Structures are given as C-alpha cells and as structure tokens.
Image (spheres, rainbow, N blue to C red):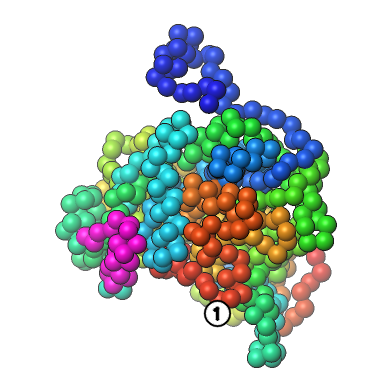
Amino acid sequence: MFIINCPYCGERDQSEFSCGGEAHIVRPKQPTELSDDEWAEYLFMRKNIKGVQFERWNHAHGCRKWFNMARDTSNDKIHAVYKMGEKPPVI
Amino acid sequence: MKNKYSIFSLIKNAFSQHENWKQAWGNPEPKKEYEAVIVGGGGHGLATAYYLAKKHNMKNIAVLEKGWIGGGNTGRNTTIIRSNYLWDASAGLYDHALKIWENLSQELNYNIMFSQRGVMNLAHNLQDVRDLKRRTHANRLNGIDAIWLDTKQVKEFCPIINISQDIRYPVLGGTLQKRAGTARHDAVAWGYARGADAMGVDIIQNCEVKGIKRNGDQVEGLETTKGYIKTKKIGVVAAGHSSVIANMAGLKLPLESKPLQALVSEPVKPIIDTVVMSNAVHAYVSQSDKGELVIGAGTDAYISYTQRGSHDVVEGTLKAILELYPIFSRMKMLRQWGGIVDICPDASPIISKTNIKGLYFNCGWGTGGFKATPGSGDLFAHTIANDEPHKLNAAFNLNRFVSGDLVDEHGAAAVAH
C-alpha cells in the first residue's frame, strides 16, 4: 500500500489505481511474421524484476488516464512518474 | 530412521524431562560438489529432495535455503488441501498430491496433522452455479469425490453461514469435496526435512544463491553466500523469487510475483469444522486447532516482493466474511501477513526442464501451492532424476507458453485467481 502521485490529479491512495504490468513492451509491428517463440516472448515472458522496474498504471477510480512509473518492487518506493510516450528515466 | 517417533520414545523421553530429544535434522556446511542441488527449502523443495533420495537413490544432494526452512510461503499459507480442479491435467496433478497426503504422517513418521474436514466452495450467482456444477461432473469423471449442495444443504453442513437471499452475494449452493481439508504447514516442511536428512541430504540454511555458472548450455555450479558449489543438476523451487534465480541463468519466465495476504483471529472455541471458500467474494475461512480463524484474502494487483500487501484487500475480504458469517462481527484479528506468490498467465504451475541442460524449474504455483506439496516434490524429483517429466506433469512444461497448450485454470478452479 502506498501513495501514487498521479501526473494529472496529484497524490492519491494506491487503491484508486490499477496496475497494467511491465511497461515498454512494444507490440510487434508485423504480427504475421512472428514465430511462436517471439509470440510467447511478447505475450507471456516478463522480467518480474526485484528492484526498480518500469510499469504502467491507470488511475481507474480517478481521471482514468494511463501513465508510467518507476517503482522499486523490493520496497514499493516510487522513484519516478512519467507520462505515456515519454522515455523511461535513468535510475 | 535413527530416531523413530513412537509412544515408546515419548514415554522414554518423558523420564528425562524431554531434554534428550535428538535434533531432527543437521546443520551441515556445504560440500564442494553435489549430484544435485535444490534451491529453496520450503515444503516443495524439501519434498523434492526427500523423493530424490528415496525413490531415485540420489543421496549426495543439498537443499539451499536463504532463510530458514519453511519460513517462506510454506509458513504463510492458509493450509488448504483439495484436488477439485476442472481440467484433466490439473485433476491428475492435485489428486496425486492428495493421495500422498492421506498417508504422509505414517510415511514420514511425523504428525503433519492432516485433517480431511472437507472443503466447501460456495456459489453466489447463476454463473457460479453453472461453473461449479460443471466442475463437480468433471471431478467425478476424473475419479475425484465431489458433490453439489443446494442452499439448505450448505446451511446443514456449515450452520453458521448466513443463507439470507437478501444479501449482496447470496449463497445459491456449493460444492463439497469431503477428502479435502487442511494440514499443519510447518510440520510438512519439518517432516520432509527430517526424512531427507536421515537419508543423507544436506539441508543448508542461511545460504542464498547469488549466481548460476554455465558452460555453454550446461549448468556447472552455483555461487552462494557460503561459497561456490559445483553441480550438474539444479532444481529451482524458489516460489515468488523464481524469476530472480531465472535471471541469474539468463532465462525469462512467464511469471509475476505478487503479495498474497492471510490473517488469523484471536482463538475461540470450535465454531467451524470445515473449510469454506468463496470464489466470487474471495474469502476463505477455516479454524486452526488452536482456535484461530484462518482467513485467506486476495493478491495485490501489482508486482511486489515486500511480503506485506494492501489494507484494502484485507478490508474487502473481511467485508465478505462478515456478510457470510455475521457471528464473527465482533472478533478481533490477531495477525496479518503476506507471502510472495509467483503467478502464471494460466494460473497453473510449471514443473519443467528448461533449454539450459541441468536446470529445472518448479514454480508458478501462484495462490495455491501448499496443497500440491507432496505431489509436486514427487514429480519434480522424477523430472530431475530422469531428465524427463512424469506423465502427470508433462502438461505443466515451460514450452506450453510457446505452443499455446495452456492449462487454463484461471477462474475455472474453485477460486478466482
């Protein structure tokens, strides 16, 4: 449980948000050319990092906008919040 | 077994004020090399070592545990054991475990307090009723005991349930597996540890794995906080930390690690003599032998390794508990904790070889691994010893995420994952 600083609404309780998982997984540009291994990689394989990871969040019970976050999964400390489309910060 | 527990050993030790009991397992320093090394000293890991030694004659093996044995999810779950899964592959896997549970105390000469008090799964809407009836039929076709109870029969089986049809999630019926129940979770780890130790397995606690050494696509050994250990076979049973170990070998797994919470109440006199699980509202309750209500809550919906979990998840579960059991409204909760569970996209486990020779993974048990402990250990030992899966865990390979042949228990199992 923690407080998230929504880039649009400010600080709100984490329970207002829903997590969209690992960020910056790029949808394949040419899905028909993909092998089964590449599909598995895109659909299922995850870094599941213990440490700082980049992830997508949605302010589901607020402005309903998506944004990105860099959060340390070993202690739930949030290092950065940045908007969709922006490059991940160097941490 | 050297120190067999019996009524006679109990009487004998009573005369010396129980001060001369032998240690149940040793505390060895790691050797330089082992035939196989199991990473993770929880129930599944210790069971794997036990069956490797017992059934596959691999005695020169070690179990590495970063903390103390049984201190992870083995000591953090709600101890529910059942096998009423929908799909054939899952039914085979979990019922294999349940059959071992039934004789495990005798086999280990260690009382694991296995109690077949029955597990009831409630239906709260029409879809639940259809799904649970379907599952009852599927279970029976697989030789697993299952019966459907209507609302009145649910009340007869567990009289404290509120069956008013005016509540938010009314009880429309439920399924019952009578062979299901609970066991003492710590005792399972301790019993397997004692059994494995007696056959020569080294159980090494406070030893964290820091790296996996490979020569091409073959594993060669492990870097640990107690030095380098050479081995050709590594079986990883690290639950929530499976991805961390996989990353050391340059492997990615289809897992997400999330906190799953449980809590216990103050102890009271016997009030609920079964296990009741409720899919739609995500609340499970049973009563421990000490008298505490043991309550299982849901997972947090984000990756975290913090072993805590959010308050709103507990609040949601307790709301449901109070609606179903108004009698508990003034009970105090004593302790709350979280364990880190590794969840697969199809909510089924992975017991599998990998594309690295000598590296095996037993993971992805998600929110329901405890029930499978003996079966999981048995099948993982088979997989490691023969470098081939047993027919019961063949479907639970890592390759299913490439082939698409998933074992989709998501929501199809007795509980919403």
Residue B36's image quarter?
Answer: top right
Does residue A70 sit above or below B311 in this rendering? below
Question: Disc 1 sits on a residue from what chain?
Answer: A
Q: What amino acid is at disc 1?
A: Arg
- Please tell me which residue is depicted at 62% across the width and 53% down the height of the picture: B386
The x, y position of residue B128, in whole percent, is 31, 69
Magenta residues (range): B128-149
User: Few, some or many C-alpha atoms within 10 Å of disc 1 (few <14, some 14-19, many ≥20)?
Assistant: some
- Please tell me which residue is depicted at 45% across the width and 17% down the height of the picture: B9
- Please tell me which residue is depicted at 31% across the width and 64% down the height of the picture: B141
Which residue in the protein does label 1 denote? A64
In-front residue for pair B14/B235 = B235
In-front residue for pair B170/B344 = B344
Say whether residue B339 is visible: no
Residue B107's image quarter?
Answer: top left
As for residue B135 lying within the magenta part, the answer is yes
As for residue B309 lying within the magenta part, the answer is no
Q: Main secondary structure of the magenta part?
A: helix
The x, y position of residue A52, in whole percent, is 73, 62
